[in-house]
């Protein structure tokens, strides 16, 4: 049975103090990069960030949105993935200069990872961690260590040529008195998870892979959650932005270009507005 794509699986280890997640994406990733001509190294890092954001979102028991950004002084000035608790994802890379680099350090340079969580109900929360490790997976583990104080390990896999990405996560569950036992369970599961081969995660069904890895443990697998690409741009949001522009400026843009157009950075959709659609903002009837 082939591995199902574009799903996130959560599972618990009933006799051990840990939980796990696995995400496997194909179409979602293809949809995110389709409108952009990213170099292979950039595409791979963006893919890793998409998989990582899915895993991060699933560790949060919340309704709302999450944004994970990498910012630095390297050839990629800015890399961002936005998602929500429904596992609707979008992502973008902004290039500061052309590059054929493939490593995190060579692509981002000296920089930070900024994770912003916006619950539907509640205050936004932001965590920042320096990108001091060699891989994105190690930087995320460091983020959990610093901000959440929960031992967490993440593995990320990419087959950028075939537009496939995957990730898996093991997280300690602080649900007993014995910290020593919790850490022993966590380390044991990390050692087992470390044996996953890239070709296995892209070819095997989740249940088969979990059995192969953890056949001596009691694994409780929850219903899979579909993951998809969804851009949040809309005509309404463009109109809302345009309404903030000075009427005289709108008038001069229309005089010069015949219309006002806005292009979404994520999906590259262009929204075009003629003068009659913007009359209320130009003539000042409402603002």
Image (tube, rainbow, N blue to C red):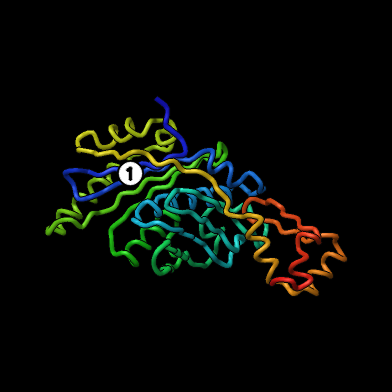
Residue 37 in picture, x, y percent from top left: 67, 48
Q: Is residue 208 left or right of residue 261?
A: left
Judged from this view, the residue extending furthest toward the front is 285
Residue 145 in picture, x, y percent from top left: 32, 63
Q: Which residue is mark 1?
A: 10
**Residue at 22% from the left image edge and 43% from the top image edge:** 13
Residue 142 in picture, x, y percent from top left: 36, 62
Compare residues 251 and 161 and report the one nearer the observer.
Answer: 251
> Would you place residue 274 above or below residue 32 in this image?
below
Judged from this view, the residue extending furthest toward the top is 1
> Would you place residue 279 above or below residue 225 in this image?
below
Residue 61, located in which quarter of the rendered image? bottom left
At mark 1, the secondary structure is: strand
- Disc tally is 1
Quadrant location, the C terminus: bottom right
Quadrant location, the N terminus: top left
Residue 208 in picture, x, y percent from top left: 32, 30
């Amino acid at each position: 049975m082939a591995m199902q794509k574009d799903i996130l699986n959560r599972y618990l280890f009933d006799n051990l103090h840990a939980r796990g997640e696995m995400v496997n994406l194909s179409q979602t990733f293809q949809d995110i990069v389709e409108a952009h001509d990213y170099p292979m190294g950039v595409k791979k890092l963006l893919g890793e960030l998409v998989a990582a954001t899915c895993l991060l979102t699933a560790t949060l028991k919340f309704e709302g949105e999450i944004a994970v950004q990498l910012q630095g002084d390297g050839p990629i000035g800015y890399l961002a993935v936005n998602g929500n608790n429904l596992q609707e994802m979008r992502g973008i890379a902004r290039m500061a200069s052309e590059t054929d680099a493939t490593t995190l350090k060579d692509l981002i340079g000296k920089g930070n990872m900024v994770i912003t969580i916006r619950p539907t109900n509640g205050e936004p929360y932001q965590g920042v961690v320096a990108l001091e490790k060699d891989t994105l997976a190690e930087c995320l583990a460091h983020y959990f260590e610093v901000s959440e104080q929960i031992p967490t390990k993440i593995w990320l896999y990419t087959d950028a040529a075939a537009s496939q990405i995957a990730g898996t996560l093991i997280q300690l569950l602080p649900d007993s008195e014995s910290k020593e036992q919790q850490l022993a369970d966590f380390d044991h599961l990390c050692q087992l998870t470390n044996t996953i081969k890239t070709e296995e995660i892209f070819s095997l069904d989740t249940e088969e892979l979990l059995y192969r890895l953890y056949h001596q443990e009691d694994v409780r697998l929850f219903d899979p959650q579909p993951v998809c690409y969804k851009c949040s741009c809309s005509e309404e949001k463009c109109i809302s932005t345009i309404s903030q522009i000075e009427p005289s400026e709108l008038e001069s843009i229309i005089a010069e270009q015949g219309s006002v157009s806005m292009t979404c950075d994520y999906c590259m959709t262009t929204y075009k507005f003629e003068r009659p659609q913007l009359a209320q903002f130009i003539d000042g009837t409402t603002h």
